[in-house]
Image (tube, helix red, strand yellow):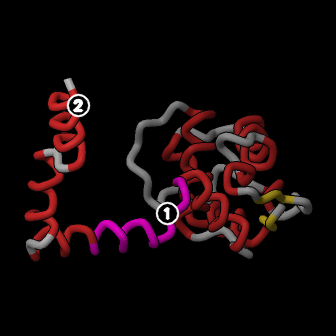
């Protein structure tokens, strides 16, 4: 019985899988892989997309041209249902804006709608006097430029 216990102890002291790992650990490819893993762990993780967008918005002092184009286009399309391709040189009439009531509705979306207006980029329009003069003869570029000059960060 003592012989069986002695054999078990010997087997526990030197298992086969330990012998294999020693030979692999000495290979250069294992060392390189271990070094790469350590380097990966030390790098900071990039922030999530939502966090990154919020950080960019928080650091902006004015809306970009693209953001203003998006706001203008989305607001006009919501009111008119137009599928016309966006062009800064097109007049609002070409998108179906024909009445003062539609112009006021577009202004309300730009100022007050958090999903379509300036609020989606964490901006607001306090002095609406510039944008309240919106008319169907304005171009999309005029509307976008007016949004840009009127909007301030929240």
Q: Is residue 46 magenta?
A: yes
Judge whether residue 100 can be spotted in this image: no
Q: Give the crowd class for mark 2: few <14, some 14-19, many >=20 residues within 10 Å.
A: few
Q: Give the crowd class for mark 1: few <14, some 14-19, many >=20 residues within 10 Å.
A: few
Q: Residue at x 52, y 54 (%)?
A: 49
Q: How many marks?
A: 2
**Is 112 above or below relative to 66?**
above
State which mark lies toward you, 1 or 2. 2
Q: Residue at x 81, y 43 (%)?
A: 112
**Which portion, as a residue range, is magenta?**
35-48
Please indicate whether residue 12 sits to the left or right of residue 112 in the image: left
Position of the N terminus, as image quadrant, is top left
Q: Residue at x 91, y 62 (%)?
A: 127
Q: Which residue is mark 1?
A: 45
Q: Which residue is mark 2?
A: 5
The front one of 125 and 55 is: 55
**Where does the image place residue 94, in percent across and percent down from the top left?**
49, 46
Please indicate whether residue 66 sits to the left or right of residue 6 in the image: right
**Is 53 above or below relative to 7?**
below
């Amino acid at each position: 019985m003592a012989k069986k216990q002695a054999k078990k102890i010997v087997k526990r002291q030197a298992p086969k899988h330990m012998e294999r790992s020693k030979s692999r650990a000495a290979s250069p490819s294992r060392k390189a892989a271990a070094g790469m893993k350590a380097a990966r762990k030390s790098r900071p993780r990039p922030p999530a997309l939502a966090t990154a967008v919020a950080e960019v918005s928080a650091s902006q002092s004015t809306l970009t041209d693209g953001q203003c184009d998006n706001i203008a286009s989305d607001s006009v399309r919501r009111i008119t249902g137009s599928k016309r391709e966006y062009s800064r040189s097109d007049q609002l009439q070409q998108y179906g804006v024909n009445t003062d009531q539609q112009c006021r509705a577009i202004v309300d979306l730009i100022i007050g709608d958090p999903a379509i207006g300036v609020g989606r980029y964490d901006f607001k329009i306090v002095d609406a006097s510039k944008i309240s003069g919106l008319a169907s003869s304005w171009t999309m570029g005029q509307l976008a430029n007016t949004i840009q000059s009127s909007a301030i960060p929240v």
